[in-house]
Image (cartoon, coloured by chain):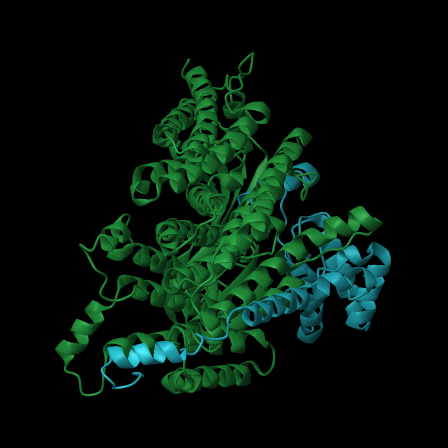
Chain colours: A cyan, B green
Amino acid sequence: MMMRFIRFALLVMLAFGARLALAVQPDEVIKDPTLEARARALSEELRCLVCQNQSIDDSDAPLARDIRILIRQRIAAGESSDAVRAYLVSRYGDFILLKPPFKPETILLWLSPALVLGAGLAAALLARRRAPRATPALSADEEARLTALTGGDGPVG
Amino acid sequence: MIVEIGHFALVLALAAALAQTIVPFWGARVGDRRLMEVGRNAALIQLALIAIAFLALVNAHLTSDFSVLNVAENSHSAVPAIYKISGVWGNHEGSMLLWVLILAVFGALVALFGRALPAALRADALAVQGAISLAFLAFILLTSNPFERLTPAPFEGRDLNPILQDPGLAIHPPLLYLGYVGFSIVYSFAAAALIEGRIDAAWARFVRPFTLVAWSFLTLGIAAGSFWAYYTLGWGGFWFWDPVENASLMPWLAGTAFVHSAAVMEKRDALKVWTIFLAIIAFSFSLLGTFLVRSGVLTSVHAFASDPRRGVFILAILALFIFGSFVLFAWRAPMLKQGGLFAPVSREGALIVNNLLLTTSCATVLFGTLYPLALEQLTGEKITVGAPFFNLTCGALLLAACFVAPFGFSLAWKRGDLLGVVQRLALAIISGAATATIGAAWLGGRSIFAPLAAGLAIFVILGTLIEAVLRAWRPGASLGAVLRRALGLPLSFFGGALAHIGLGVTLLGLSGLGFGAETIATLHKGVPERVGPYSITLDWVGERIGPNYKEAATTMTVRSGDAVVAEITPARRQFEARQMTTTEAGLATLDFGQVYVAIADPTPDGGVPARLYWKPLVTLIWLGAAAMALGGALSLADRRLRFGVAARARAGRAPLAEPAQ
């Protein structure tokens, strides 16, 4: 995590000089709270393209601000969230989506938890099958010795 | 001169590591005790030498010796002394030196306290530990020498990165490294057990304290880092699923699984092969994390290790130790004898479910972190795997693991009674379900996670408490008898209980996120602005001068109704030496929640653009983590798990009355 700060700091230094703006600024906010909420929800799932793994909602970068404003303009103009997202993907590619879309290239990624869990379960079941089921029952000879030892009271428990 | 002594000590440490790798290993093969003993001495000497090197570097930083490149690049004469010291590991070279120092500390602990172990096992473990040390010392000396001189020496250093000028840097990396590197012992012992082809409960008992130390420190280290991010980065986030964070989470997940499966092995002599496997992957993930962070693969432009030689070198180390151990595992593991039968519904069974869920989430983090890299290499297509992916996948898996936790804690070993446990936990189950329902109704469907997490948190906390009480209390028992029983329970039982309660507390803190509030506004003097149940008023805004920065400072009053509940002082600092600005958030802790205010530069008319947050229960996230770590420490304090006790118990002098938990 330390690296995160260092990278973050270096990034800010290299790319944007000394000035840090605040993530979402008061002048960006749309007056209508439902539209603003939609804009916020959308900006939380979009990546700041010049940052490390940060959503544009959290980012201080000027490009993130530009995209936030663009989203708000389009939403205020009555576009659906899906349409705005599709527009941004057409411009910047899937790279901008923090949640990768489900498509052939990402099938393995999305299925990986299920596959690993399934493989683990299968391995556990297999190991169980291979293991001896229970302590084998006593042979007649052992029964006789046990009876002798316990003085004829028979097996206990 | 002191700098050269440090450098020379590091070279000698390399020689000691070489001796530690070869001699005891050879001794164990030919059965020569004197050769095996060399490992012990080499480990102690190595620690002394690395400590000298480390202190030499600390001295160079403290005295601002800018003829040392590392100091000139990462320090400044005006930096407060504490940041001169923590600045030692606030850079690539210094942090690697800290890494090997901690590695040597753990090696020395084995040397000092490993007397109860079979000599060959200890010799092999020290040899493996020596090999790790050898690899990393070579890495430092060949590619990342912190003692490199700079001529001519500059008059002033380039300053420590302002974001690192924080107590967080003094605490977070050492804790994290104690965790990361602590797993190296577990790894070394797993490798030694495979080499010897024998593993038993005594092995688990000896490794357990190291596991608990490593796990507790890693927990604290991750929590400290997340708290640091929370208050420094200025938007109140504390976990970003950043590759670097994922790199620390993976060993934690594997380590948590290991702590649980090692318990099964210790008590029931089962899951041996699996426990060895986890021991190997826990440290492999630590190495992978080091590689990802240090090589710059993930962070091509911004990593401080931009030298490609370093990446290749660490990749070679990684390949050697991970593949080496896997080969050893594939070759020798089938020889380990399995024991300990159990029914599917039993504590062992629940721990297997726990292990499955934890390792799956660990694998998911791994896939999510590396998938974009692999895809870009194979197809050239760039995708992002970010927080929404991990929240969905790992979130679900980890919530499921939380759900299993109280059942595992209450089930009996060998053959459990699920119906009985459900009856025991009925109160906890009902309370949890009620909390989730009320939470969902309150939020009106705004978040699924928050009410679910809150319900689960209540279930975990109450369920664990109920189990703890029922262990001591019997219907009709007198108070004295209950107390005697409670005191008779092993400390490790309370350790486990505390760790589980800590898990619930952290989960409760996370659920609070869904119930928070946020206001974005430009504040003007005397005009209150609402956030959640509080109102915040800007009282003063002006400039202040600090030791190596100047800041735009403010004071604000937090009110609940008309009553003043807190004063906060959010600010923005401007650091001259690096021309950087940092955000100092204004924080007020109210109950377990926090009011969090981050400001931007004041506008010319005296307004202050700000983000105001109300984050209910947020402090519980870190308090819970602290409780988990404390639980680990409590288990560690259990008398019967101290070094050597197992051997004395075997000798019959101190027979174990009750199995440790």
Measured as percent of width and height from the top left, residue B510 is found at 50, 67
The quarter of the rendered structure image containing the C terminus of chain B is bottom left
Task: Reply above or below: B392 against B649.
Answer: below
Q: Nearer the viewer, residue B77 or B253?
A: B253
Q: Is residue B527 left or right of residue B106?
A: right
* Label tally: 0
Task: State whether residue B252 appears in this view.
Answer: no
- Residue in the image at 80% along x and 71% along y: A82
Measured as percent of width and height from the top left, residue A42 is found at 71, 66
Q: Nearer the viewer, residue B256 or B460?
A: B256
Quarter-of-image position of residue B463: bottom left
Measured as percent of width and height from the top left, residue A33 is found at 66, 73
Q: Nearer the viewer, residue A28 or B358?
A: B358
Task: Reply above or below: B592 against B455.
Answer: above
Q: Nearer the viewer, residue B138 or B277?
A: B277
The quarter of the rendered structure image containing the N terminus of chain B is top left
Task: Reply above or below: B645 against B561.
Answer: above
- Residue in the image at 48% along x and 74% along y: B404
- Residue in the image at 59% along x and 44% along y: B322
Task: Reply above or below: B217 against B84.
Answer: below
Quarter-of-image position of residue B385: bottom right
Q: Is residue A44 left or right of residue B50?
A: right
Task: State whether residue B265 appears in this view.
Answer: yes
Measured as percent of width and height from the top left, residue B259 is found at 43, 58
